[in-house]
Amino acid sequence: MAKQRSIVYWGIMALVIVCFHLTYGLDIIVPTNIRWLMEAHHDWGTHYLGWAFYRDAPWSFPIGNIPDYCYPAGTNIGLTDSIVLPALLLKPFSGILPEDFQYLGLWLLLCNLMVAHYTIKILDIYKAKAVYVILAAIFVVLSPVLFFRGMHPSLCAHGFILASIYYYLKPATAATAAAINRSQVVLVLIVSLISPYLWLMIIGFTVILPLKHCYYQKLFTWKQGLKYPVIAMLGSLLLWIVVGVISFDTGGLEVQNSYGQYSFNLNSFYNPSGFSMFVPTIPWLRPEHQYEGFLYLGVGLMALAILVIGYLIITRSITRIFKNKYLIPLLVLTILLALFAITNEVSINDKVLFTYPIPKFIKQIGSTFRASGRFMWLAYYLFFIFVLVVFVKSKAPHWVKVPLLVVIVAFQIYDVKNLYTFKQRNYGSYDSPLNETRWNEIIPHYDRIITYPPFTFTLVNNMDYQDLCFLALKNKKAITLGYSARVDVKKYETYTESLTNDLTYGKVKENELYITTPQNLDAFGAIIRNKDIQIDLIDGYYLFYHKRKRSDGLKRDAATQKQLDSVRTVYSKDPGTKFVKVIKRPDFPKDEIKYNIEDIYINNNFIKISGWAFIKDKSNNKGDVLYITLSTQDTTYISEATQIVRPDITQGFNREDLSSSGFSTSVFTDNILRKDYTVGIAVKDKNDKWTFINLGTAKEIKDKKTFGNYK
């Protein structure tokens, strides 16, 4: 008998591998095959890049940090969906692994094998015949839910859900109860290094399993049972801290007010979302979010469920199920997770049925695990297993059940066949759409790649951050792009603001390569005028880099050179054209204008200034125009400032309306003001009357930290 079961087991594993080949293709498990990942330009590419940058990262604490991906904020391997566990195990061997190396294909295969393994073990509890075990295992492995999650390999580890169900259903004795609970704790600790969502789904089993053994079966004491959830919780917390998934200095993982966006729609059990050959697609309330709750049963499983429910009603067997009181904790856990998945905004189709208030702490948990629709997976697999077990154990003759189950499985496969084959997967190394040869002439000369804007997914082409990150990866450079499931918003905002200011003031670091798009060239105006900066154009991206690192630019065709010359011309025009008026230097009264300079930067050829100003005796300055003046010994150049609405000035001085007082402007001073000059403010009222005030020489202004005459 044992030999026969072993043959059946390995036969099922072989069938699972065949199914995997017919759906994903076995070539995705080849470690050097990264093409299928990177060509997806979506989740798969992101997951590969997270691992690839991590394997090159220096060891640090926390051990999961990736400093060069999403530079300078960095990220963590636990936040890139690259699956922490294999990444940690493989990182020490990075030096001997091939340059292009991925484990995600093998991981997907292992996930399918694990689902089959625990389906077999659950059916063994109920002593199912081999033919049913084979059909059931293939039925569950080809679950629409499992294949729908294929773009997120970390979320495909559904075998941990089935394993937890197995340990709960497994008969226990006083001699085996402790071992079963220890196994469940090990599952939780392992899954904490795979997916926090799966972790939250199965952590409850470390509570209900000892509850079953203590309360219902009296196999050990409460004191003995309590240690299992405590060890699981503390052990998971420790692992997350060591890896760096959570830390004490960057805040939590909560995304404010996001609970409910990715909720479970009540039609998801029978809504195929376009993947059924028989059932039409039904609208969701938020299709861009509620796909996370995809839980289509398939016509095969729905047909089997109808037969099973009919059988239970006809044979009056439902009451027998409720006699098993030890199932109550499992049912309660499933209901709690289901309610969390649905959220307090209950929806069906594109309508909201009703809402209800929930405690704040539930919202906080939901904002951390915002893709709440996923938490219906436990209910899904319990229902799947329940229907299969009841059907297999029913009193109908085998000559009826076996062919019927074969037909049902066949219909299920045909119904969702498009789900198994819709993803195109190519084999080999990744052939980037970017001209890598030209990029690689520049990138090696610099330490970091700075994109503007940073931390974005799309610059020129959709999701092109992956291709730019791939270039950085190949050259082992840090880059200000990347994906992270959670980000330190403050770090992102601080760096973006600092970078914007540096670019505005023409500051360029010699060891950094700057990349931007045509739409963002204005931010590089001061840099374009800098004779020490080289400009190039590759694949639609503008590159800026310091000549001290590479004095010569790339070889360019005539069209590219013409475009670059045009950019230089536009941004290097004689700055005198930016001045609206050139006059003989006027008198500068000391106190006719109230003002405050909030930000000012001056270098040899550029000045940027912002603040507020108004004629001191005015109660209403609507219609007044603000200017910046630059004066030599006998001439004053006047540049119109960009006015900014400042209602706070009206309130602060308790006047009628001074909201036109704010200003900000940038002026290039080279080629026109080579001698010492003074900076001033001018106001022209609606009657064309001019009022001037002198702020001081450029040197005096540089030496001052704050100044104004508003007190």
Image (cartoon, grey):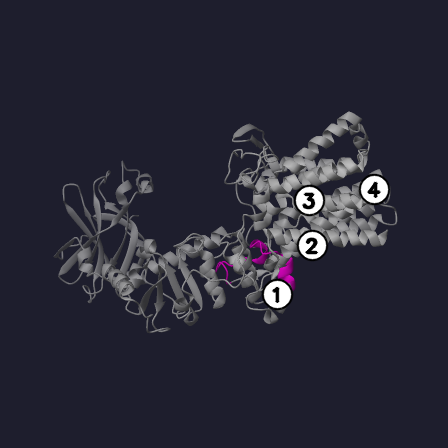
Label 4's element? helix
Q: Magenta residues, as a range? A: 68-89
Residue hosting label 2: 190
Identity of the residue drawn at 64% across and 40% down: 412
Residue hosting label 4: 214
Amino acid under disc 1:
Lys
Q: Residues within 10 Å of mark 1 (few under 14, many from 20)?
A: some
Name the N-terminal-most of marks 4 and 1. 1
Residue hosting label 1: 91
Amino acid under disc 4:
Cys
Q: Nearer the viewer, residue 78 or 234?
A: 78
Q: Is residue 110 left or right of residue 630?
A: right
Determine the CA span between mark 1 and mark 3.
Answer: 33 Å
Amino acid under disc 3:
Val
**In the picture, residue 451 is in which quadrant?**
bottom left
Q: Residues within 10 Å of mark 2 (few under 14, many from 20)?
A: some
Identity of the residue drawn at 70% across and 35% down: 304
Name the N-terminal-most of marks 4 and 2. 2
Determine the CA span between mark 2 and mark 3.
Answer: 23 Å
Asked if the residue at tag 4 contacts the one at tag 3, i.e. Cβ–Cβ closer than 8 Å, the answer is: no
Residue 684: give x, y in percent of width and height.
Answer: 18, 46
Label 3's element? helix
**Res. 229 visible in picture:** no
Residue 546: give x, y in percent of width and height.
Answer: 35, 69
Q: Is residue 668 left or right of residue 46?
A: left
User: In front of the other: label 1 or label 3?
Assistant: 3
Find out whether residue 454 is within the magenta segment. no
Residue 286: give x, y in percent of width and height.
Answer: 51, 36
**In the picture, residue 378 is in which quadrant?**
top right
Q: Residues within 10 Å of mark 4 (few under 14, many from 20)?
A: some
Residue hosting label 3: 140
